[in-house]
Every structure is written in structure tokens, then in C-alpha cells.
Image (spheres, rainbow, N blue to C red):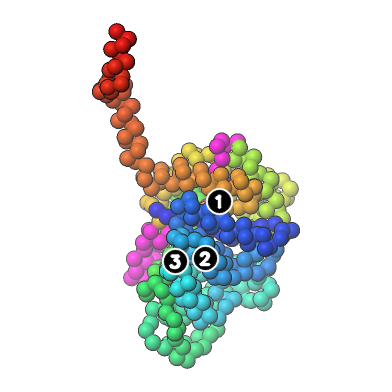
Amino acid sequence: MKFGFFLMPCVHHGENPTLVFERKLELIEYAESLDFDEVWTGEHHSGGWEIIPAPDIFIAAAAQRTKRIRLGTGVVNLPYHNPFDVAERMAFLDHLTYGRAMLGVGSGALLTDIKMFGLDPTKQRAMMDESLEVILRLFREDGPITHEGEYWQYKEIELQVKPFQDPHMPVAIASIGSRHTIELAAKNELMLLHLGFGQGATPEALSTFWGRVEENAAEAGTVARREDWRFVAYIHLADTPEQAWADVDAGAMRELKDYFFHIGHQPLYEDYPGQPAEEINFEQAQRKAAWMVGDPDQCIRWLKELNEAAGGFGGVLLIPTEWTSTEKLYHSLDLFARYVVPELTGSNRGMKRSWERMVADSAAGALPVSPSQAERLERER
């Protein structure tokens, strides 16, 4: 199982953007020091809260500060771009990162971006599909390609610099579980960035989701690989559940009410249709969205239950929020890396068995007497 970040990121609109970008780059350095495997960075152009407009440039900067961690776009919104440019820039980035680049794609979901670019929301999926077709052909076919589509037309185009990874870097699609994204992933053998928070973060929902993935893969004649499934979740940990809740209560509600409620997400957090925003508190938001806010033991139980019900997913991506101080965020990530990861990967199983044998042998009096203990006992006699 892989572990990483899904870095939108959301920051308060009153901040200095230069310092925000530096803080996020430092976060990726810290993630690598904790042995996280990957970071996916989003693309947004408006709204004042999600402010990284070019994830490929951000990844190029992060690659210069790191050595091992894999770096992906989470996601490039394909309707906003010329598909040849996306393919060419990502192939170039793959070389600059020595094969650590990953391409995550989507149709674009931020309403303010859609409005600003004057896109027709009913055509975004079709634009994404056509763009993805061009990109994958440029990656996978040897020689020039010609494409006559509804949104893009090309005659004998080719990437002069092919991707570093053979045949190309991993390609993923963001999904909340819609039929369209699952079908597209199955058809093209894509990774899935499963935005499973909310109703998608239950054992039943995860089991159903993967069942649909496998069904669509079978229909497409492809293979659904669990190692390509990333489960995206809001997770904040502290030494006690009470401290974890105190850490993020105010920050989470500020982000919801100042940003997400304005872009159409309020119904996800309502106990009844049209519930006034001022009635929604942290306890309700946490319950409705299935955020994991607690201590490491709670997180271990939660993720194990989800993983077992789903039959096993390939990775967990944490959303590192700005709901609390950088110090408390780093402590949360440290707790996750130290205590949660080894329980899910089993990397500590030998240590635990060795300790259990020691305790059992000690209780049974089965441990030999050391020379120093023998000398002490002899003196006491």
C-alpha cells in the first residue's frame, strides 16, 4: 500500500501567496522525510482559496528539493488546455524528475473556473474524453498521429521528446464514483484518485465502488488493478481525540463557510435540505463528511475496516489542510507515518512478534539468567 498527499491546497485568501507556495514546497520535503510515497497537486485559477495554477511548474520546483517521492498532477483540468501541450509538458517533466512524474486528469469542477473560462458544463466530460484520447495516443503510439475531433484537430503531430518512463508515466483520473469516470478509467487502464470523503467513505460504499470498477474493466476487456486505486481522505491526528478536534474545529468551519459552501458544497453537510449554514457545526460536518479526526488508534481501526471491506485499495492519500498550525499539521503527519502506516503495511510485524515472545518467555520464567544477574544473585545469597 502506498501513502501520500492530495494537495489541493486550500489557503485563506488573505495570505501572501509567495509564502504559501514556499510552505507547500517545504511540506513536500517533510513528507519525503517521513517516507511518504507520493504527492498529487491540483490546478485552480479562481475563487481565492486554491491558488496553484500550474501543477507541473510546482512539481518541477518540488523535484529540485526532493530525491525519491513521486509527484503527480492532481489534477490537470483537460478542458482548459490544448492536449498536445499537456502531453508535451508532462513528458518533459518526466525527464526533469528522472521518472517521478505522474499525470492526474479531470474535467474541472471548480464553478468559478468554469464561469471564468466560459465553458459549457454539459460539454466538459466530452472535452476531457477527447483530450485524454489525444494525450494517450501521443504517449503510446510510435510516430505521428492525426486526430479529427469535435474540439481538437491535428495532422501528423508527434512528441519529439517521449516520456522518460516506458511507455509513459502513470495516468490517473479523479473520481467521486461517477459512472463516467469509472468507465473511462477501465477503458484506458488509468489509476483512480477516488475522492471518497463523504458518503463514499463507508465500508459499503467502497466495496460497491470497486465492484463497479471491476465490472467496467471486464466489459472493456482490461484488468482492474487494486494497486492503482488511491483512496483520498481528510485525516487529522493528535495524541488524544479531544486534542485533534480542538486543533481543527475553527479552521475547518472557516474553510467550509468561507469557501466550499459558496461553490455548491453546502448540501453535502446538511442534515436536511436547505439547512441554514449557521446551524452546521463541526460535529455535524465531521459526521456528514466522514473526516477522520482523532488519535492514531482510531485512524488505524477506521482504515483497516475500510480496507478490509473494500478488499484492499492500493493507497491512501491524505488531504493536508490549513485547519490548524503548521506545527500541529506536522505532528499529525508524524503520528500517521510512525503509527498508522506500519499497522497497515505490516512493516512492524516482526517487532511486535518479537516483543510478544519476550513478554511470554519472561512471564513463564523461560529466559536464561545473564552473567550479571547470576553474579548479583550470588552476592545476595
For the residue pair 361 and 314, the one nearer the viewer reads as: 361
Which residues fall within the magenta stretch? 213-242
Residue located 51% across and 77% down the image = 89
Q: Residues within 10 Å of mark 3 (few under 14, many from 20)?
A: many
Where, by quadrant of the figure, is residue 109 drawn?
Answer: bottom right
Amino acid on which the number 2 mark rests in the picture: Gln
Amino acid on which the number 1 mark rests in the picture: Tyr
| Element type where label 2 sits in the image | helix
| Element type where label 3 sits in the image | loop
Q: Which mark is residue 100?
A: 3
Q: Could you give the CA–CA distance between mark 3 and mark 1, rounded to whole angstroms?
A: 25 Å
Is the residue under label 1 in contact with that under label 3 (CB below 8 Å)? Answer: no
Q: Which mark is residue 64?
A: 2
Q: Position of residue 183 (x, y in %)?
A: 44, 68
Q: Let me know if residue 83 appears in the view.
A: no
Q: Is residue 218 left or right of residue 291?
A: left
Amino acid on which the number 3 mark rests in the picture: Arg
Residue located 29% across and 8% down the image = 381
Q: Magenta stretch: residue 217 in it?
A: yes
